[in-house]
């Protein structure tokens, strides 16, 4: 009799665990913020190539996260004596349209803000929302959501969350929602006061460290934080990287990221190992910083080339989706740039957008 009771109890517990697991899985599915395929667009000019237009069409992209401008602290030395010499949050690198936005894809404006701006201006939330609204009206962009991108830390968390609450309140008055980016290291902090977050699954390593083998995406780093997904109290999507970069070092010191530099040019570079190149002759390089006009590169400098192989993306995607069942409902690729995604086959791009490999 006791044995029968024991087996009945075991069966009951098994059923309850199964139901609980299903409920958790269903809860995550219900929390998914959007459905469909999406991309980030992170350039200062809007002008798509034919391959980029085909990318949107071939992959049935439904949403474009469009960076409009950055907000950084700059010295204001021209707006009156009182503000002379003070750091003031200032928009820069504003998106310019070389052609109209005529896509059927939904637009989500994105504003990047450095965390040192957050306590410098109590009216910053007003200014950001107003500028976004004016920008979208001027460029005929319909929008129902704003996303804020900020690499906030514990020391700036309170100021950032206060800023988000003000932004969200202003958006709600017009039935618009607010999202924010979430970096892996921010999983150890409380969730920001937004409608949902986008896990930026890249820049996981220290790009300034010459010993970092791949600063864009490390499976080990993702595995360290993946377990926190189940308990994270905010709906999430994930952005996966299909970009590469070149890190310039002088000795062991990081100098800059290089853009539009051909490391396959054997007259300028000599390959020294996996992803490591030595500079053979001087040249002036382009960097992502629009304020730097020509970065001098000298013989003896080294360049580390970081690129995320499909197998790494595959492993990371499986790892995250195993922890959070709804993550596959909206998958975002970073970014819509022919120079980036051309390194992957169409089958590989499709596999990033699908939930199973």
Image: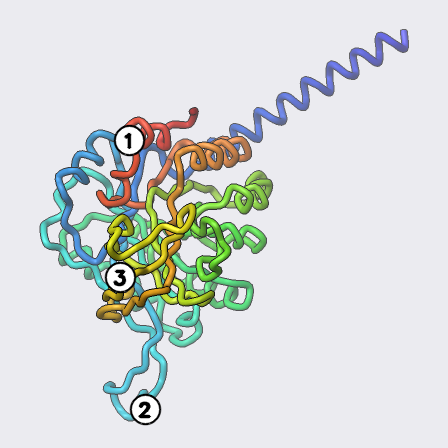
Picture coordinates of residue 117 (x, y %)? Answer: 40, 71
Give the label, 1 or 2, closer to the camera. 1
Picture coordinates of residue 136 (x, y %)? Answer: 19, 55
Q: Secondary structure at mark 1?
A: loop
The residue at 22%/39% (across/down) is 105
Query: For mark 2, what is the residue?
Result: 82
Which callout, 3 or 2, points at the residue further toward the start of the chain? 3
The residue at 30%/39% (across/down) is 38
Which callout, 1 or 3, points at the residue further toward the start of the chain? 3
Give the label, 3 or 2, closer to the camera. 3
- Residue 119's place in the image compared with 104, above or below, is below
Picture coordinates of residue 302 (x, y %)? Answer: 38, 60
Quarter of the rendering occupied by the N terminus:
top right
12 or 36: nearer the eye?
36
Query: For mark 3, what is the residue?
Result: 69
**Distance of mark 1 from mark 3, alpha carbons?**
31 Å
Left or right of 64 on screen, residue 30: right
51 or 304: nearer the eye?
304
Query: For mark 1, what is the residue?
Result: 345
């Amino acid at each position: 009799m006791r044995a029968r009771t024991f087996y009945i109890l075991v069966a009951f517990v098994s059923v309850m665990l199964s139901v609980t697991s299903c409920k958790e899985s269903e809860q995550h599915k219900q929390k998914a913020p959007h459905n469909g395929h999406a991309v980030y667009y992170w350039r200062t000019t809007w002008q798509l190539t034919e391959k980029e237009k085909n990318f949107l069409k071939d992959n049935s992209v439904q949403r474009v996260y469009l960076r409009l401008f950055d907000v950084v602290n700059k010295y204001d030395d021209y707006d009156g004596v009182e503000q002379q010499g003070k750091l003031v949050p200032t928009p820069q690198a504003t998106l310019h349209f070389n052609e109209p936005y005529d896509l059927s894809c939904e637009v989500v404006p994105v504003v990047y803000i450095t965390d040192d701006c957050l306590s410098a201006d109590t009216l910053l939330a007003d200014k950001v929302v107003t500028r976004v609204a004016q920008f979208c009206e001027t460029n005929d962009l319909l929008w129902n959501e704003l996303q804020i991108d900020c690499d906030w830390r514990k020391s700036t968390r309170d100021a950032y969350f206060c800023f988000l609450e003000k932004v969200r309140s202003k958006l709600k008055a017009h039935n618009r929602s607010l999202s924010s980016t979430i970096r892996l290291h921010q999983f150890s902090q409380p969730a920001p006061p937004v409608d949902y977050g986008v896990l930026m699954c890249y820049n996981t390593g220290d790009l300034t460290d010459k010993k970092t083998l791949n600063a864009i995406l490390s499976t080990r780093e993702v595995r360290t934080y993946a377990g926190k997904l189940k308990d994270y109290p905010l709906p999430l999507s994930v952005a996966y990287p299909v970009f590469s970069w070149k890190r310039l070092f002088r000795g062991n010191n990081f100098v800059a990221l290089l853009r539009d530099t051909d490391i396959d040019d054997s007259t300028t570079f000599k390959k020294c190992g996996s992803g490591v190149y030595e500079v053979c002759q001087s040249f002036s390089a382009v960097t992502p910083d629009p304020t730097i006009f020509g970065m001098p590169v000298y013989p003896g400098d080294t360049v580390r080339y970081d690129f995320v192989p499909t197998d790494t993306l595959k492993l990371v995607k499986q790892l995250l989706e195993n922890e959070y069942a709804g993550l596959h409902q909206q998958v975002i690729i970073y970014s819509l740039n022919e120079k980036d995604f051309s390194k992957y086959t169409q089958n590989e791009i499709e596999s990033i957008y699908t939930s199973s490999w």
